[in-house]
Image (spheres, rainbow, N blue to C red):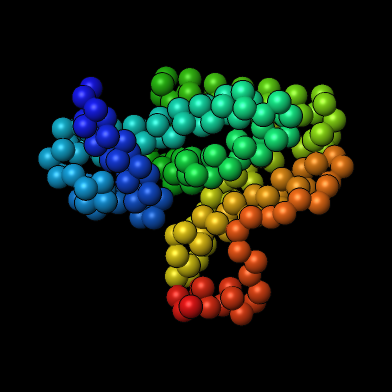
Amino acid sequence: MRADARRNQERLLEAARDVFVEQGPGASLEEIARRAEVGIATLYRRFKDRGTLMHAVVLHALTGTIEAVRRARQDHPDPLDALAAYVHAVLDLRTSAVIPTLLGALDLDEPHLKAARTTSARLVEELLEEAHRTGGLRADVDFGDIGLLLTRLSRPLPGAIPDETQNALAHRHADIFLAGLRADPAASPLGGPTLKLADLQRLQHGTR
């Protein structure tokens, strides 16, 4: 695939992910093409129908997740630091937002999707086993806690909160969550904005 074609495909997959998260499986394909800054004909050249596009979006998200956990383990010798890097990477990929959104519209047991899901789960389980073995992770934290809390953190907040603030808050709340996973919690600075009640009310009503 030529470099420009690869860029178009990447933009389409990212735009489709975001629009599906916002609008659900019936999201406008024209809106996806518009956000990707390509024509609708380009979308259909790459993906023959809605189902093909949804399949590609989920596979792309799962592949990115596999790369994220491998990179986290490679870059961070401490398993708990690797877990934190993985969590923040998955929030940026929006894997835990798009897959639940498309859950009822796709067969996740389709061979390619199932293989990617199995690989991703295995790598995360191995990372958690390492974190337990080194004593850094609470003994009662397991795979389901990470997966389900990532889903909760990935859900868009209600109201007119800008996307960049939504993202910053997701990462801040991930830091709070990760601090609670430590067997011996240590004080560490939190990222993202601190919101008082009045700040939250202003954001929810779209005021500054």
* Image-quadrant location for residue 49: top left
Q: x, y percentage for residue 20?
A: 36, 48
Q: x, y percentage for residue 129?
A: 75, 25
Relative to 64, residue 87 above or below: below
Q: Residue at x 60, y 58 (%)?
A: 192
Residue placed furthest toward the left? 41
Which is nearer the eye, 127 or 73?
A: 73
Side of 187 relative to 125 (left or right): right
Side of 64 relative to 142 (left or right): left
Q: Residue at x 64, y 49 (%)?
A: 174
Q: Is residue 62 visible in the rendered structure shown here? A: no
Q: x, y percentage for residue 171?
A: 59, 51
Q: x, y percentage for residue 70?
A: 57, 24
Q: Residue at x 66, y 74 (%)?
A: 196
Which is nearer the eye, 135 or 95?
A: 135
Q: Residue at x 82, y 26 (%)?
A: 134
* Image-quadrant location for residue 46: top left
Position of the N terminus by quadrant: top left
The count of marks equals 0
Q: Is residue 141 visible in the rendered structure shown here? A: yes
